[in-house]
């Protein structure tokens, strides 16, 4: 009892010890990155130089930057500086912090099996929460998404850092917490042994390392109703529920409903988005070189209702044989002057299963030419899209530009600075954050509608080759349209 009392050092002691003795490299990296964030002029160049000596870190950063989560169909980046230019400083900074955090916390090989497993479970929950928080803010600016990601990831930094230290105190606390389900009892034992709660320790590290206001606000005012704080709170609650062997169905339904309300969508739609987010989390953990976390990440099926856990969302991969078959059919239609609806359906079938998309549609212009309305929709959530996917063209938005320009377009990242100003926020919520393809339907040089395709449900981006295939189908369909109108 005497030894335990003497170990209760308090927040300042543990903050200083972790920052200066246990994790000085992580502390230094984070402080450098946060300092660079305030220097818009030279931050990109300094960033590359500041970590180039760390080959392992550089390798992780590039692997993640080129992963499906971050790569928007561009060519691979080979330097950190180039990655920062392509992805933006906020994104690359958080990739750096995440990579360094994971390596720093996992590198202690002297932990007992029980403590190490406790650490892995906690880090897996944090990583999944970070991905969920960013997913829930996909309709907002990239800066807000990245701030929420890093805040959710570091929400339990104090506890993670403590367990990664190992030692007699960690072993003793692990023993005392074994089998304890009451949060107040656990909190009391942590305070007795450390002289502070894990939340207080996270707050101390956040201030000492300059980790930003979003993390501190999420810790101090978790009930604040701003979108980013709400997303961080719900992401953590969902991750905690999912970490259970058998998640409490009442708790899960409650949090899913709250998250769906935040996004302005139906709970079933949120479940599908969260399902794909969980799949992406597994892949991203491997890209970070943290395969050891994968076994502790929640299975994607846990987001689905119990009776649907075995249902798998269809992932349609490009099928060149099917593409050729459908292109041959369209070529035949051009010769035989086939009815326009058959041309549209065949083109969409080629795009759906040949190019490999989640959903595709023909959007026809209204008689007033002031809106686009779904005529034929194929793929996942087709009924919802046919009912809800009506696009107003009153403003000078992206779809109106596409109609006027009469040219195919590949919108690789609707939330990026390149496209954000031309896509109203109300419209972005209906579009895939991973991008979409569209091309005009032209009859005798007049646009009558648009072809549209995305992969939002499976959370995948397009490649240049796939955009070319999509364009080939739409251009050949336009030839068929014009042919069918001739006497």
Image (spheres, rainbow, N blue to C red):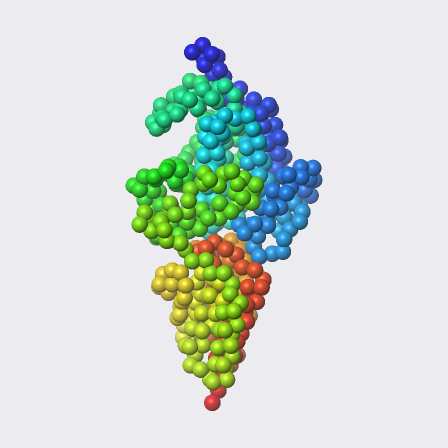
View extreme (top): residue: 2
Residue 348 spot, x, y in % from top left = 45, 70
Quadrant housing residue 248? top left
- State whether residue 22 appears in this view: yes
Q: Nearer the viewer, residue 443 or 380?
A: 380
Q: Position of residue 457 (x, y in %)?
A: 44, 56
Indicate the quadrant containing the N terminus: top left, top right, bottom left or bottom right: top left
Number of disc labels: 0
Tell me the residue at 69%/37% (across/down): 53
Residue 296 in percent (x, y) is at 45, 38
Closer-to-camera residue (296/19)? 296
Residue farthest along the bottom direction in this orientation? 487
Task: Say which of 425 and 433 sits in front.
Answer: 433
Looking at the image, which residue is at 34% across and 39% down? 246
* Rendered residue at 41%/49% (across/down): 275
Q: Examine the rendering and report whether any part of residue 446 can be seen.
A: no
Who is closer to the viewer here, 236 or 215? 236
Q: Where is residue 171 drawn, in percent x and y?
A: 47, 22
* 337 relative to 191, above or below: below
Q: Residue at x 47, y 85 (%)?
A: 336
């Amino acid at each position: 009892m005497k030894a335990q009392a003497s170990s209760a050092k308090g927040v300042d002691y543990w903050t200083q010890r972790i920052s200066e003795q246990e994790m000085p490299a992580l502390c230094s990296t984070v402080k450098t990155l946060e300092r660079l964030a305030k220097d818009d002029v030279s931050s990109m160049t300094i960033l590359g130089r500041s970590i180039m000596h760390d080959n392992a870190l550089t390798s992780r950063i590039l692997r993640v930057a080129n992963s499906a989560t971050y790569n928007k169909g561009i060519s691979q980046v080979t330097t950190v500086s180039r990655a920062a230019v392509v992805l933006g400083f906020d994104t690359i900074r958080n990739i750096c912090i995440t990579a360094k955090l994971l390596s720093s916390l996992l590198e202690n090989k002297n932990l007992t099996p029980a403590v190490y497993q406790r650490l892995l479970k906690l880090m897996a929950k944090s990583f999944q929460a970070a991905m969920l928080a960013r997913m829930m803010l996909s309709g907002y600016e990239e800066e807000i998404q990245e701030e929420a990601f890093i805040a959710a990831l570091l929400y339990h930094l104090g506890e993670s850092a403590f367990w990664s230290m190992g030692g007699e105190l960690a072993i003793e606390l692990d023993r005392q917490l074994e089998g304890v389900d009451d949060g107040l009892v656990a909190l009391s034992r942590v305070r007795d042994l450390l002289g502070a709660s894990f939340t207080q320790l996270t707050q101390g590290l956040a201030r000492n390392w300059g980790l930003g206001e979003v993390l501190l606000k999420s810790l101090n005012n978790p009930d604040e109703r701003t979108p980013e704080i709400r997303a961080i709170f719900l992401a953590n609650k969902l991750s905690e529920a999912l970490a259970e062997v058998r998640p409490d169905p009442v708790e899960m339904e409650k949090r899913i409903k709250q998250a769906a309300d935040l996004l302005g969508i139906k709970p079933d739609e949120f479940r599908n988005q969260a399902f794909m987010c969980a799949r992406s989390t597994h892949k991203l953990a491997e890209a970070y070189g943290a395969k050891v976390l994968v076994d502790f990440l929640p299975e994607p099926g846990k987001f689905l209702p119990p009776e649907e856990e075995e249902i798998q969302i269809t992932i349609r991969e490009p099928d060149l044989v099917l593409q050729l078959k459908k292109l041959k059919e369209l070529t035949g239609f051009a010769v035989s002057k086939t009815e326009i609806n058959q041309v549209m359906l065949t083109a969409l079938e080629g795009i759906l299963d040949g190019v490999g998309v989640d959903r595709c549609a023909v959007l026809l212009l209204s008689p007033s030419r002031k809106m686009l309305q779904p005529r034929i929709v194929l793929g996942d959530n087709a009924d919802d899209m046919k009912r809800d996917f009506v696009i107003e063209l009153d403003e000078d938005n992206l779809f109106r530009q596409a109609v006027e320009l009469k040219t195919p377009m590949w919108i690789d990242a609707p939330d990026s600075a390149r496209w954000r100003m031309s896509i109203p926020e109300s419209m972005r919520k209906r579009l895939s954050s991973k991008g979409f393809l569209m091309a005009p339907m032209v009859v005798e040089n007049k646009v009558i509608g648009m072809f549209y395709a995305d992969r939002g449900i499976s959370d995948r981006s397009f490649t240049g080759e796939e955009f070319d295939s999509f364009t080939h189908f739409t251009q050949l369909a336009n030839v068929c349209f014009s042919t069918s109108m001739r006497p």
